[in-house]
Amino acid sequence: MSKQLLQKQADTIRFLAADMVQQANSGHPGAPMGMADIATVLSSHLNLNPTNEKWLNRDRLVFSGGHATGLVYSLLHLWGFNVSIPDMREFRQYNSKTPGHPEYGHTHGVEITTGPLGQGIANAVGFAMAAKYAQNTLGKDVINHKVYCLCGDGDLQEGISYEACATAGHLELDNLIVIYDSNDITIEGDTSIAWSENVKKRFQAINFEVLEIDGHNFDQIDKAIVTAKSCDKPVLIIAKTAIGKGAATLEGSHHTHGAPLGEDEIKASKKKAGFNPEEKFVVPYDIKGSFDKLIVGLEAENAWNASLSAEAKEKIEALQNPNFDAIKFPTFEPGSSVATRSSNHKILNAIAKAVPGFIGGSADLAPSNKTELENMGDFPNGRNIHFGIKEHAMAAMTNAMNLYGLFRVFSATFFVFSDYLKPSARIAALAGIPQHFVWTHDSIGVGEDGPTHQPIEHLSQFRALPNFYTFRPADASENVESWKVALKMNAPTAFVCSRQNLEVLKPEKAFGDVSNGGYLLKEREDASVTIMASGSEVMLALQTACNLEKAGIKANVVSVPCFDLLIEQDKEYIDTIIKPNTKVFAVEAARGLEYYKFADVVYGMDTFGASAPAEKLFEHFGFTTEALEAKIKNDL
């Protein structure tokens, strides 16, 4: 391909991005213009099929920097995905296909929602992990694509990138190629004001092959990609670029990062490049043809499909369409005593035995989280992933693994450390990624480890997150029912499990079920009180209701395994389980303020807990039958 054509291709991308930002009077022209040369060359290496964005053996391209959105939409249009010129004219406008940051499931061709800086790097590592496991499962002749990630200085400054890339280096993911747009510019100016590390040495230290190039030299870009594709370890290509490359007077300036260039600057830039300064959103015919992947992509997928053996097709079919009805869930004897983290262990193993694509792991806490899949080996050949102490990257990597197209993947840590992975959990909710989060040590029941390890506000935080479903089962049997619901949801779910043993309840229910999020567990005729609770406090509520009845106060008990599902129920259901003529009390060994949606009074935590045996803490903070009974009588 001639240098002249390559330059015209790159300039087309530059001016599409600049026009989008100018039209919206909002956005980031600098990064797309600076990476246009890299994107042009990379495009010729990518194996994609716009007619089937879900083709399993396609290359994955992750844009870690959301400020490169103009580049994303330009490329998707040029490749042949369903992103039109009119769509680009509606950049950043309400209900357009081209929102301010790319969103999975919203814009055709977007692999994953990245958003916050660094997320995309971890997502790319997750895709590479899934691909490596798929390759080991199905064979190198079936899965042999690459995972590419475009990132910038901001991505590498975020700590999540180090966590994720250290994992990639440890696993020797030779299918991962990270291209670093090194322009030394962030919002406040030159990166030297806050950053002085040697990126090359950092990545060499974590077992990456590192290549350095001029990010505007087409030959160097091509040679680096060719070299990277044959390396036996993950590769970082450090591409030195100028932000806002091609801008008439602002090339290299941090002012191009997050603001429109201005009409005069764009016209001068187009004129300098030999484009008509009066035209906007122009894609010359020869340029569209040089990028377009509709025909070659379809041919590549057809050839791949033809090469698959009957055995490979059968395995892929089983992985892509898991039969959750085939799971033989464990049963638990009423009256026995089982921590929900322990019942969860049996449930996870039951799922894994029936569902070949069910894999996962913990942030170095498998013995405590009880998440080991027994006799199923270690990743990347087996199904137990050892993420190490990297909660932030773990959740982002697992998000991508769940979107790869073959696997259902869980991650695990202590509930209090969900703080470290909250951004990734939020992205999972936003994008509708069906990741299963396993969070154990759910309350002050953690005991002696003290307030640093006792989650107080965390239930409230995740219940406030839209499209995220947090299950806190009251016992082992409710845990089983929660998993039955969660496995069939197209949204992230979390299982908040106890460290301490909980008595298995009798199977009787008065009305409703776990699938409703809350149900009437115990009903008394002419009750004047309703007590709501989740997790370990459900038994407390039942025992307290019995004591109140002896004192002449009849109380119903509502178990709330999933508050998020409960608030989705209609008024008729709510009025059936929470009688309108009763005074409603909620009890939870956490903050619990969300219960005021239903409750008149909430008994929860007002402090961060303390260090002592669990029984002592429940007594001290008023979570005993005697204390709860006294509080209810007083408030009545």
Image (cartoon, rainbow, N blue to C red):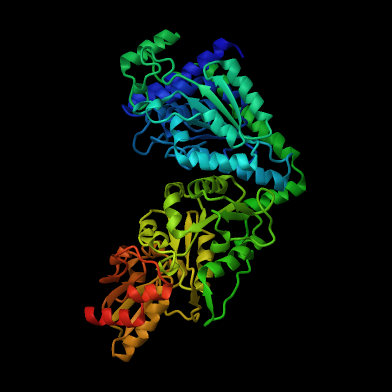
Q: Is residue 404 above or below residue 102?
A: below
Q: Name the quarter where the N terminus is drawn.
A: top right
x and y, in percent, of residue 443 in the image = 41, 66
Q: Residue at x 43, y 68 (%)?
A: 447
Relative placement, left or right, of 112 versus 549 is right
x and y, in percent, of residue 488 in the image = 53, 59
Q: Name the quarter where the C terminus is drawn.
A: bottom left
Q: Residue at x 43, y 72 (%)?
A: 613
x and y, in percent, of residue 254 in the image = 36, 23
Q: Is residue 466 above or below residue 167?
A: below
Q: Is residue 579 above or below residue 383?
A: below
Relative placement, left or right, of 257 versus 312 is left
x and y, in percent, of residue 138 in the image = 72, 46
- Residue 94 seen anywhere in this rendered image of the structure: yes
Relative placement, left or right, of 98 versus 410 is left
Q: Residue at x 36, y 16 (%)?
A: 250
Residue 517, quarter of the rendered image: bottom left
Q: Is residue 521 above or below residue 319?
A: below
Give whichever of 65, 402 is nearer the camera. 65
Q: Residue at x 46, y 72 (%)?
A: 474
Total numbered labels placed on residues in the image = 0
Give whichever of 512, 71 is nearer the camera. 71
Give whichever of 123, 113 is nearer the camera. 123
- Residue 148 seen anywhere in this rendered image of the structure: no
Residue 286, quarter of the rendered image: top right
